[in-house]
Image: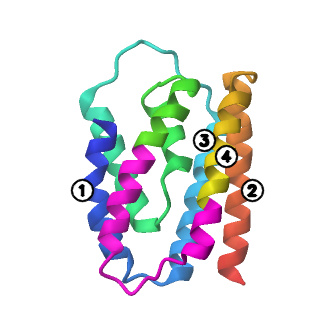
């Protein structure tokens, strides 16, 4: 439900973002990454009660889909915080679940941008994709050795670092 609710908003937002200057999109991304990072650092994981409201899951998924499409990011940096803090999904399950959500939203957002004059550089894309797959594979193995609280804090710190780097890029 979380992933499905984001598909249409991702497509619409992907089409709309083509009309927004790149620097504005980068600054919005940096601000959102900073907020998500701070949220992951400050907030403790909510207690698990085993149930998630369908309405709440759909609302969070639709919001994530819209951000994914508009900012042109896979959404993983927001999917994990949304799953952990809004829907009380355990960190270990949120990481795996976010991969499905990211895949669905990113593919739909890419389709929404297909009409624009954006060219995909396969020489850059394929090595990046291969490295990401290998990193995800190794990251899964390493995640079993680290506590959920530590993963949450590291994730928050990385998001803040990305936000600073992206903000600096947008300004320069």
Location of residue 19 (image quadrant): bottom left
Q: Tell me the distance, in whole angstroms, between the alpha carbons under discs 3 and 2.
A: 14 Å
The percent position of residue 46, horizontal first and vertical second, equals 53, 22
Q: Which residues make up the magenta segment?
A: 101-128
Q: Tell me the distance, in whole angstroms, between the alpha carbons under discs 3 and 1.
A: 26 Å
Q: Of helix, strand and loop, which one carries label 2?
A: helix
Q: Of helix, strand and loop, which one carries label 4?
A: helix
Q: Tell me the distance, in whole angstroms, between the alpha carbons under discs 2 and 1.
A: 30 Å
**Which quadrant is the N terminus positioned in?**
top left
The relative height of residue 153 versus residue 62 in the rendered view (above or below) is above
Of the numbered discs 4 and 1, the one sitting upstream in the chain is 1
Residue that numbered label 2 is attached to:
161
In the rendered structure, does residue 118 fall within the stretch colored magenta?
A: yes
Mark drawn on residue 8: 1
Q: How many marks?
A: 4
Mark drawn on residue 39: 3
The percent position of residue 118, horizontal first and vertical second, equals 43, 82
Residue that numbered label 4 is attached to:
134
Of the numbered discs 4 and 3, the one sitting upstream in the chain is 3
Taking the image as shown, residue 67 lies to the left or right of residue 128, namely left
């Amino acid at each position: 439900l979380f992933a499905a609710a984001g598909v249409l908003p991702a497509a619409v937002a992907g089409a709309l973002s083509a009309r927004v200057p790149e620097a504005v999109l980068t600054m919005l991304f940096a601000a959102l990454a900073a907020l998500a990072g701070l949220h992951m650092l400050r907030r403790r994981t909510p207690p698990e009660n085993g149930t998630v409201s369908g309405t709440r899951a759909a609302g969070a998924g639709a919001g994530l889909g819209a951000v994914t499409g508009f900012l042109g990011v896979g959404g993983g940096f927001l999917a994990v915080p949304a799953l952990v803090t809004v829907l009380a999904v355990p960190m270990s399950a949120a990481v795996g679940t976010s991969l499905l959500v990211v895949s669905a939203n990113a593919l739909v957002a890419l389709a929404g941008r297909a009409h624009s004059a954006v060219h995909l550089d396969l020489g850059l894309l394929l090595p990046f994709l291969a490295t990401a797959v290998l990193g995800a594979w190794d990251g899964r193995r390493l995640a079993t050795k680290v506590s959920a609280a530590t993963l949450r804090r590291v994730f928050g710190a990385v998001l803040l670092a990305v936000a600073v780097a992206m903000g600096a890029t947008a300004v320069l």
